[in-house]
Image: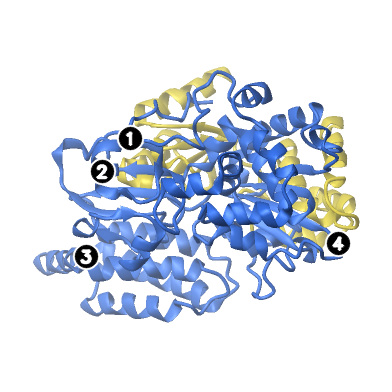
Amino acid sequence: MTFSPQLEQRFAKMLTRYPEGRTRSAVIPMLIYAQDEVGAITRDVIEEVAKRCKVTPVQVDEVVGYYSMLHRKPQGKFHVQVCTNISCLLVGGEELYEHAKKKLGVGHKETTADGQFSLEEVECMGACSWAPAVEINYDFHHHVTPEKLDQLIDGLRKAH
Amino acid sequence: MAKQLYNPPSPLETRILSKRFGLEGSETLDVYLANDGYKAFLKAKEMAPEAIIEEVKTSALRGRGGAGFPTGLKWSFVPRTSPKPRVIVVNADESEPGTCKDRLLMEYDPHQMIEGILIASLAVQAHVGYIYIRGEYRYLVEAMDRALEEAYARGYLGKNIAGTGWDFDLYTHTGAGAYECGEETALLDSLEGKRGIPRMKPPFPAVAGAWAMPTLLNNVETFSAIPPIIRDGGAAFAALGTPKNGGTRLVCISGHVNQPGVYELPLGFPMMKAIEEVAGGIPGGKKLKAVVPGGSSCPILRADECDIAMDYDTLAKIGSMLGSGGMVVLDETTDMVGFALRIMRFYAHESCGWCIPCREGTTWMKKILTRFHEGQGRREDIALLGELSKNMLGRTFCALGDAAALPTISIVEKFTEDFETYLARQEVMV
């Protein structure tokens, strides 16, 4: 498999950041950026990352299962992450998550049939003072109401 | 990106670290330089490492990540004459539920943190640093990268910084979703490309940290506090707070308040004043029920315990913690069984699985709290939750086990009546 020239450039730069012989350090950043481009951590991604970081594929593989943002299967094009942790919980985070389930017709870590949206109930994202919060891919949305979530989702649907 | 996250300045605040928030272009080097930027670094460059560390000790600055360890003392543990190179690591893995302050410091004043790191590099004689940013904060990785790029381009990072002859390289490093990586040794394993599992201490990171090199590890806010300390003197910073609790800190107020937000308050600020005046009180004229004083790991306070000064030692005296500055306010309508369950679901999800008391303890307590919450509770579950929690305390490599146990013990003991209500409701149903 091949990565885009931009990603290769990012990887090359990444590998120079760590002390000599410590290229294993680039494994996690490399995985998440590769996932952003490829859509999932596939067998090929693991092998490519292992090659670049000079580690064995199993040393990459064992990391994938640990970090919650790394996925072996593709997420939706828009990954909707609704926080229900304490600060969000107190101001309607759970209701918002229930609403998101109905709106998208999918549950926790599921993807819509058209592959456009996936949903995840997530832990605290650091938006406590602007709760309830939703992150879609890497974009934060604060003070989200069910109506605002509908608008966000409908807007993304229309645009794509 | 959503609109600005900082609040309009409140007269009740003491804006030291956040003083540039709201200035047009506060994230740029030019605005930073025009507003006291790099005065502290140039001053520190003329000081001996010991003198810098002394100044930080005098400031009575304590770690803002949660543990509250005296920063100057931590710096003094790093063997700066070691034949091994020293490394600086910034903990920007802000993940403690209720905490959302480091975001602002990185988004609105990245150069303040960079200058703080540079001063630390002089103190421990390090020439490289890494900012470990949680994966969910991708926009901040990008914001920090822009700031770093600007600093490099203008000679404030790299070789011969600001013409002083000092060299320092600084990089960002993204995580990929794991609360555990906020724990400093797990963070180091993650930085090394591994699963984030805590290490046995000693050796402490100061002696053998990243890649077994002597490592200075502090939170974003801790580093951001360094420039004002060096610029205006440690004594001035210390005087803002209470004895042994120097300065100000960013308090993240969330939950049942009219004006949730991140406010910079001096250490020792009255908690009730923070709730009622700074954050505008509880909506709908409801009564206060409880406060999580510093992130979900802290033992919860009953309303009648909240008439206190917010500093590390006062909170410790009443059996809780000031933690990470995440203050969550709960009104009288809050169901504490549901609240305890949500906290335990979090810790069960985030337990890295390395230590059995934590891995099994959180999972079983989640099961018990789930059945209680669903109306299937048993009277003996109340005592069982307390007993399981107490069996986890101090029996794990890192503090995650304690972080799950402590709030649970406090909720079960202080809000037993909420559990009783569930049992009474079940009896009626039968």
Please report whichever mark, 1 or 3, sits nearer to the chain's N-terminal start.
1
Looking at the picture, the colour scheme in use is by chain
3 and 4 marks on the same chain: no
Q: Give the spatial CA distance, label 2 vs label 3.
A: 24 Å
User: What chain is tagged by disc 1?
Assistant: B
Discs 4 and 2 share one subunit: no
Indicate the amino acid at tag 4: Thr
The answer to whether dots 1 and 4 both sit on one chain is no
Which one is in front, B68 or A144?
Answer: B68
Give the distance between the C-alpha atoms of the residues marked 3 and 4, in whole angstroms.
51 Å
Q: Position of residue B413 (x, y in %)?
A: 25, 71
Can you tell which mark lies on residue A56? 4
Q: Which mark is residue B273?
A: 2
Q: Which label sits in the foreground, 1 or 4?
A: 1
Residue at disc 1, secondary structure: loop
Which tint is chain B?
blue
In the depicted view, which residue is nearer to us: B55 or A49? B55
Residue B309 visible in the displayed image: yes
The residue where tag 3 is placed is B415
Q: Please rate how many residues cluster around mark 3, counting C-alpha atoms within 10 Å: few if below 14, some from 14 to 19, many from 20.
A: some
Query: Mark 2 and mark 4 in contact (Cβ < 8 Å)?
Result: no
Q: Tell me the distance, in whole angstroms, between the alpha carbons under discs 4 and 2.
A: 56 Å
Q: x%, y% of residue B142?
A: 67, 33
Up-down relation of residue B413 to residue B180 (above or below): below
Q: Label 1 belongs to which residue?
A: B12
Image point (63%, 34%), residue name: B110
Name the amino acid type tagged 3: Phe
What is the C-alpha distance between the residues marked 1 and 3?
Answer: 32 Å
